[in-house]
Image (spheres, helix red, strand yellow):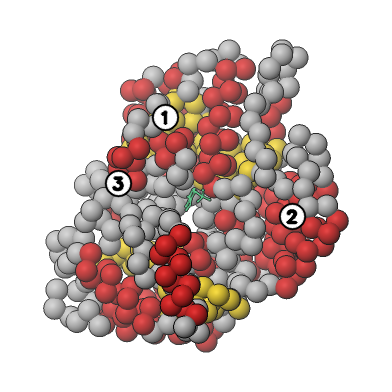
Amino acid sequence: NRAEELLSKDRKYVWHHISPHNDNPLIFVSGEGCWVKDAEGKRYFDGMSGLWCVNVGHGRESIAKAAYEQMRTIAYSPMMQAHIPAIELAEKINEWLGGDYRIFFSNSGSDANEVAFKIARQHFHQNGEPTRHKFIARHRAYHGSSFGALSATGQAQRKLKYEPLGAGFEHVPPPYCYRCPFGQTYGSCKLECAEAIEDAINWEGADSVAGVIMEPAITGGGIIVPPPEYLTKVRDICDKHGVLLIIDEVICGFGRSGERFGHRNFGVKPDIVTMAKGLTSGYSPLSATAVRADLYESFKSKEANSHFRHVNTFGGNQVSCAVALANLAILEEERLVERSAFIGQELSRRFQVLLSHPNVGDIRSFGSAIGIELVEDQTSKKPAAADKVLKVIAECKSRGLLVGKNGDTVPGFNNIITLSPPFVASDDELDFVARTVIAAIAALGSSS
Ligand code: PMP
């Protein structure tokens, strides 16, 4: 049969991402709305929107048309010159950001972060501050797979076999209130998690630090949502020490957080914003690094070689930019950012009953990025063993729902079930998601 034939060829030829040796992958053949179909004809609700990206759902005609029309008109021209889709998209991204930014296009979230690091370093170089080259990032954070982005990543398991990585990346503990790394309780703490950033800047030497990079809420590392004042405090610390604040909106951007961008939930203005996934809802590879306009101006000096020496052949290609414009039009016309906020509230509300299950320690959400933290028992908070986590995922899958977990992190801390449904999920579909997750966790049994 066709499915078996495909599977044997897959095993023979394809090297899968991250999965050790993916001997039983789903082979997706089609998608419509929130649903995907595999080679055996089984349908699944795409509870992770692919990998946090198919936010407008599968099979969108207007995006397919935009790609087709653009390919017929002109499919490619390099970004040393200009083209209409990039011009229009850069303007649109500025509108979404509500600020004055210059947009550098690349292909992936990792690319966008590499560009951010290089721009930050060169900016200080242009200003005659060549020693400002370090970056502060956080444990548990994921910023990409390429060397710079991996250096910024705060998960040892992803890095160990690839060292030495880029020098100059320091990590501090995240604002993880459920397991406060400082042993504090939110409400009576001094936001030691934010102070840790200032400590790191001071100990590294403030005039050696170029930037602080963070997601508005850590997503892949376990849906770690900071207290409301955290980001403003970080912004103040960066300002005080002349350090750039780089916000990674690769997952949170374009509605996942329930706002247009995650940082808008906290009222801060970043110096650099990186974005990818939701920019095209995964219909075509594209990412962007938005840089404060006056930083861009610092590259305009008359000095030879003051320009940013970075080229990316496919970055900002005409087809991907046209696709992004069609995607953003859908988000606006169908008011999907608001829908995302609703989805997050609704699923969190439904999931509250899970807190009576001994293996559920915490439920967190940032817009419609949702995490259910599984524990061995609620008192010790010991992270649930891998078999429990895998059982919940398998149980959801057998009931037709795909969910995720918090990546490939430190052993014993891979215990957070994640959901990020497409924003087009109907009320009935949300009901299906809620019922399925609740039933899958109930299937663990109730003895801890
Ligand atoms: N930053 C964050 C926050 C991400 O979640 C990811 C990907 N999951 C990346 C960067 C890297 O993006 P890409 O896989 O497109 O390189």
Q: For the residue marked with disc 3, what is the amino acid?
A: Gln
* Label 1: few (<14), some (14–19) or many (≥20) C-alpha neighbours in 10 Å: few
**Residue 190 visible:** no
Relative image position of residue 173 (x, y in whole percent): 31, 42
Relative image position of residue 141 (x, y in whole percent): 39, 46
Apparent side of residue 317 relative to residue 7 in the rendered image (left or right): right
Reply above or below: 173 against 392: above
Residue located at (66% from left, 44% from top) = 315
**Marks 2 and 1, how far apart in space?**
33 Å
Reply above or below: 177 against 29: above
Element at label 3: helix
According to the image, label 3 marks what residue? 157
Apparent side of residue 221 relative to residue 305 in the rendered image (left or right): left
* Label 3: few (<14), some (14–19) or many (≥20) C-alpha neighbours in 10 Å: few
Using the rendered view, name the quadrant where residue 289 is placed.
top right
According to the image, label 2 marks what residue? 319
**Marks 3 and 1, how far apart in space?**
16 Å
Residue located at (83% from left, 52% from top) = 74
For marks 2 and 3, the one nearer the N-term is 3
Element at label 2: helix
* Label 2: few (<14), some (14–19) or many (≥20) C-alpha neighbours in 10 Å: many
Residue located at (78% from left, 64% from top) = 68
Reply above or below: 151 against 208: below
Relative image position of residue 230 (x, y in whole percent): 42, 45
Query: Which of the image's four quarters has the C terminus?
Result: bottom left
Residue located at (79% from left, 58% from top) = 71
Between 7 and 183, which is closer to the camera in this rendering?
Answer: 7
For marks 2 and 1, the one nearer the N-term is 1
Using the rendered view, name the quadrant where residue 314 is placed.
top right
**Marks 2 and 3, how far apart in space?**
36 Å
Badge number at residue 166: 1
For marks 3 and 1, the one nearer the N-term is 3
